[in-house]
Image: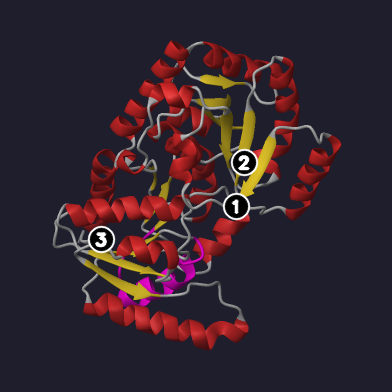
Amino acid sequence: MDKKSRILYLRATSMPGAGTRVLVHWLNWLDRNGYEVFVSAPHKGWLKEKLSRFRNKKVFDAEFFIPKAKDYPRFSVLVLRLCLFVIKNRIDIIHCNSDIAYFTACAVAKITRRPIITHLRFHYKKEFYSWLFGAWRNPDLVILVSEAFRREEIKKIHAIVPDTPVKALHNCIDISEYPESVMSDQWGSDYIFYPAAISERKRQIQLFRMDQILQEKCAGLRFIVAGQAKDIEYWELCKQEADRYPSNHIEFVGHVNDVSSMYRNAFLSLTLSEYETFGYSVLESMASGVPVVGYRINAVEEVVGENTYLVELDNFEALANPIMSLRQDMDQWQTYSKRLRERAQMYFSPDYICPKLLDMYDEVLAKRNEP
């Protein structure tokens, strides 16, 4: 993509979730390499602080929402203001980094006749795509965050928008933001870190059985679980399980902004999800040099690579084996740690991912300019 080309990124939240973190990595790379940075997002909190560091940026402060009938006057004002921003700044492509922001992006793209890219990180039903794409405006490109996710979704998407390209682009990470601690000290840590929103899909309740198994093996390990309770009913089940086993070694600490320090001081990182489209916490763990242990699912395996310590779903005894093996052998721990960190740097750094993203922009612009 030529440095004169201008991309407007839309993001519906300023919170430091995976999508926002990846967006900041993109923007930082673009800014560092002489591209102008255009962002439309809530200009507050964590994201505002990050954007303040960029030299060559323009930010449109916006609260995106899915409009209901009573919201259309406010929605129309938002669309008008954003259209003026697009025209004034000669934006070439609108890149929607959020499904919630897509509704506004569609209206703006339709009025200003700009191509629109949508970037999806979650699994949706076919009916959602019918509603999202069919009722508003077809995207010029759909980007999904892993090849495993793309294979799962492409038939559903093409059933609604058959001519729209659907491509995979991995999330990226800047490992300089996740400095590793001294390996020998980290290996001696006594906690396993599980960063994930509390929901049935993430299976935190299985930690109580894992804790029992590890204590029977005299592992001397505890679990720290970081994440908001998005599924309240499931969170209640977890609390009931904690009451059943009051001697457990599991601590739920809620949302944590500074996850890098949690990784840096952990012995292992755990993933128990039954399904992921990517698994950003796995990549953060790799960037921190923290070995990953968990269940073998396609997207996570795609990120971690070969020769891993992943086991089949729900096999508690099998999951305990690599934990104990790494606990008893520091050389094995360090070899795995080093390999994961090198893989994060080689295949998931902004220097590797962002040029692929620019190539996608070139293809969209070239297609738009075809006679």
Q: Residue 157: x percent and y percent?
A: 50, 50
Mark 2 lies on a secondary structure that is: strand
The disc labelled 2 sits on which kind of residue?
Val
Where 301 sits versus 21, above or below?
above
The disc labelled 1 sits on which kind of residue?
Lys
The earlier-in-sequence mark between 1 and 3 is 1
Where 349 sits versus 108, above or below?
above
Q: Residue at x 42, y 75 (%)?
A: 62
Q: Is residue 369 left or right of residue 283?
A: left
The mark found on residue 368 in the picture is 3
Most distant residue in the bottom direction: 73
The earlier-in-sequence mark between 2 and 3 is 2
Residue 84 figure quarter: bottom left
Between circles 2 and 1, the one closer to the viewer is 2
The disc labelled 3 sits on which kind of residue?
Arg
Q: Specify start and end residues of the magenta stretch as a single range.
A: 99-117
Residue 279 visible in the displayed image: no
Front residue of this view, candidates 268 and 205: 268
Q: Residue 259: x percent and y percent?
A: 48, 45
Where 50 sits versus 91, above or below?
above
The mark found on residue 126 in the picture is 1
Residue 332 figure quarter: top left
Q: Residue 69: x percent and y percent?
A: 61, 83
Q: CA distance from mark 1 to mark 3?
A: 27 Å
